Amino acid sequence: MLSEYLPVLLHIVVAIGFAVSALLVSVLLGKSGRTNRTKDTAYECGMVPQGEAQPRFSVKFYLVAMLFILFDLEIVFMYPWAVVYRETIGADKTILWSMLSFVSILMVGYVYALKKGALDWKN
Amino acid sequence: MQAAVLEISALVLGIFLLLCEAFAGALDKRRLAYGGIFGLGLILLASFFVTAGPLQPDAVGFWSFYAADPLALFFKRFALATTMLVLIMMLESAPRIQSGLGEFFALPIFTCAGLMWMASAIDFVMIFVSLELVTMSFYVLVAYTRRNPVTLEAGVKYLILSALSTGFLVYGITWVFGVTGETSLARVAAAFSQPNLERAPALFGAVLILVGLGFKIAAVPFQIWVADVYQGAPTAVTAYLSVGSKAAGFVVLLRVLSAFFILPQVQRLLVAVAIATLIYGNLAALPQTNLKRLLGYSSIAHAGYLLVGVVSFSGAAVGFYLVSYLLMTLLSFTVLIVVANSAGGEEISDFDGLSKRSPFLALAMMISMLSLAGVPFTAGFFGKFMVFDAAIQQHQTALVVVAVVTVACGFYYYLKVIRAMYWESPARAAPIAFSQLSRVTMTGLMIAIITLGVYPQPILRALSDASHPVTAQR
C-alpha cells in the first residue's frame, strides 16, 4: 500500500547515508593527528592573520539586509504574474488590480521604513 | 456587501494607524489605540450587514478559498470583539511599554485581520497564509518588552516552538496533498471518502496537521511553551494569545476535522488528547503561585473542555464555550493588569486583601474566577454544561467522567485567588487607580458573564445557524 512512497524512503536513506559516509571516510582516510598550531591558523594569502574571525557588524546592516530580502522577494510573485498578464488582461482587469493592491501594500511598508529611518545609515 | 470587505477594512485600518504613527511624531500614541478601537467597532457593526451564505462545495476561484458561512461570520465578530477588548487592556498597560507604543497598538489590528481570514479559510493554502499572519504579528507582540529577560525568553521560546509547529503543519499539508492531489477542504474530504484511498499516508498527514493545530490551541503534549510564554509576554498580549489564537485554532480545527473524521482513528486520537489535556492542565495549575502562570495552565485545561466539544461534533457547544471563555479570561486579565500596575507583580499574594483596597476589582475578579471554575449562574457553567451534554449524547462516558473530576480539581485553584482577595489582609492600603474606560469594560464583561449564565439564548440563536460542519455532512 505504501509502495508509492518508496522514493521518499530512498531519498531519506540516501540523505542520511551520504552524510554518514562522508564523515566516516574523512575520519578513516583523512590524515588526522598531524596537526600543529601553524596548520590550524586561518589562511590569509600568506599574511599573518589579524583580528577576530567573526567581527561584529553594525545592527543596521541586518536591518538593511532584511529589508532587501523583503522587497527582493516580491519579484518572485511578479514573475508568474508577468507571464500570464498579457493573456488574461483582455478578459478581466482583476489581474491588474490585484497586483496594484499588492504593490501598494509594499509601498506603504517602504514609506514606513523610510520615515522611521531604517535606511538612514548615519544615525 | 461581501464578507471579504471586513478583513480588507481591518487591514486598511492597521496600515492607516501605522502611517499615522510614522508621520505624526508628536501625536499622543494613545489616540491610535482609541482610533483602533473605534475603527474595529465600526467593522464589527458592518459585519451585521454582510451577506452570509452556506458553503458552496463546487465554488471556484476566490470562493473555493474563502467561506462566508454563518460560522465564519460568528468567529469574525468574535475576533473583532476580542481585539477591541485587548486594545483597551493595552491602553491600561501602556506605561510599561518602553518604546514603539504606536506599533504596539497597530499590530493587534493586523492579527485581527489574520484571525478573521482564518475563520473563513476553507483551503489549506488559505489556512496556512492566515495562520502565518497571526503568528508573525504574535512573534513581535510577545517579545515587545524585550529589555525584560523573562519576556525575551518568552519571545524566543514562542518563536522557535511556533516555527517548529508550522513546519509540522506544512509537512502534513504536503502529505495530504500527496495522497489526494487537493488542498481545498471539501475536495480533500471527498477524496478521503473514496474506498481506494491509501489510508496510512492520509492518516500520517492528518496527524501531522493536528500536531500543528494542537500547538495553536495548547493541547497536551504540545503545551510546553504555554506557561513560560504566558508569564513572560506583556499581560495584554497573553490575554490575546489565550483567547484570539486559541479561538482561531479551534475554528480551523472544526473545519479541518470535517475532512478528517472520515478516518475513524482521528476521533480516538482526539479523545486521548482531550483526556491528557484536561488532566495535565488542571493538575499543573494546582501548585502555581503566579496568577499569570495559573491562568496559563487554566487555559490548557479549557482547551481540554473545548476538545471534548470538538470530539462530540458540537459546533454550538464549542462556540458558546469560546464566547464564555472570552468574557471570563479577558475580565481576569484586565483586573490582573490593573492590580499588577499598582503592586508591581503578578503573584497571587499581590491580590491579598484586594476587597478592602478596591471592592470593584475584587468583585470583577471573583466573578471571572467563579465563571472559570464553572459555578452555576455564570457563563462558564453553561459552557461546560453544553459541552458535557454534547459528549453524553455521543456516549463519550469516559471523557465526561474525567472532565467532571477535573472541574472539581479546578475549584481549588480558582477559589485560592478568591480566598486571597477576601480573607487575607492587604500588604498596603493605597487605592488602585485605573481609567474610566477600563471600569466600563469590566462592568460590561461582568454583566455579560452573569447574563449569559442565566439567559444564554442570544448566543445560542446566533450559533444555531452556524452549525458544526461535521454534523452538516453526516
Image (spheres, rainbow, N blue to C red):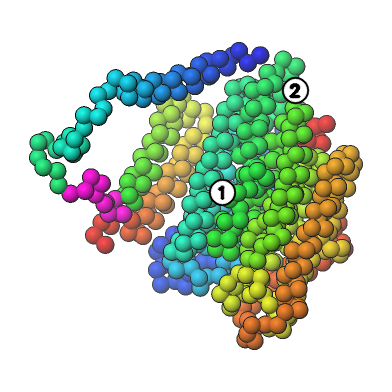
Q: How would you rate the neighbour count of disc 1 (Cα within 10 Å): few for under 14, some for 14-19, many for 20 or more?
A: many
Q: Is residue B96 above or below residue B430?
A: above
Corner quadrant of residue B454? bottom right
Which residue does the image show at 59% across and 26% down from the upper left? B175
Residue numbers of the magenta segment:
A51-61
State left or right for residue A122 relative to residue B129.
left
Q: Circle 2 sits on which residue?
A: B193
Q: Nearer the viewer, residue A18 or B181?
A: A18
The residue at 81%/56% (across/down) is: B407
Side (left or right) of A111 relative to B77:
left
> What residue is pinned by disc 1?
B134
Residue B3 among those drawn in magenta = no
Residue B236 falls in which quadrant of the image?
Answer: bottom right
Magenta-colored segment: predominant secondary structure: loop
**Residue in front for this viewpoint, B406 or A7:** B406
Q: Residue B356 in the image: state x and y as whole percent.
A: 72, 84
Q: Position of residue A102 (x, y in %)?
A: 46, 43
In terms of depth relative to the viewer, which is nearer, A10 or B365?
Answer: A10
Mark 1 lies on a secondary structure that is: helix
Residue A53 seen in the current view:
yes
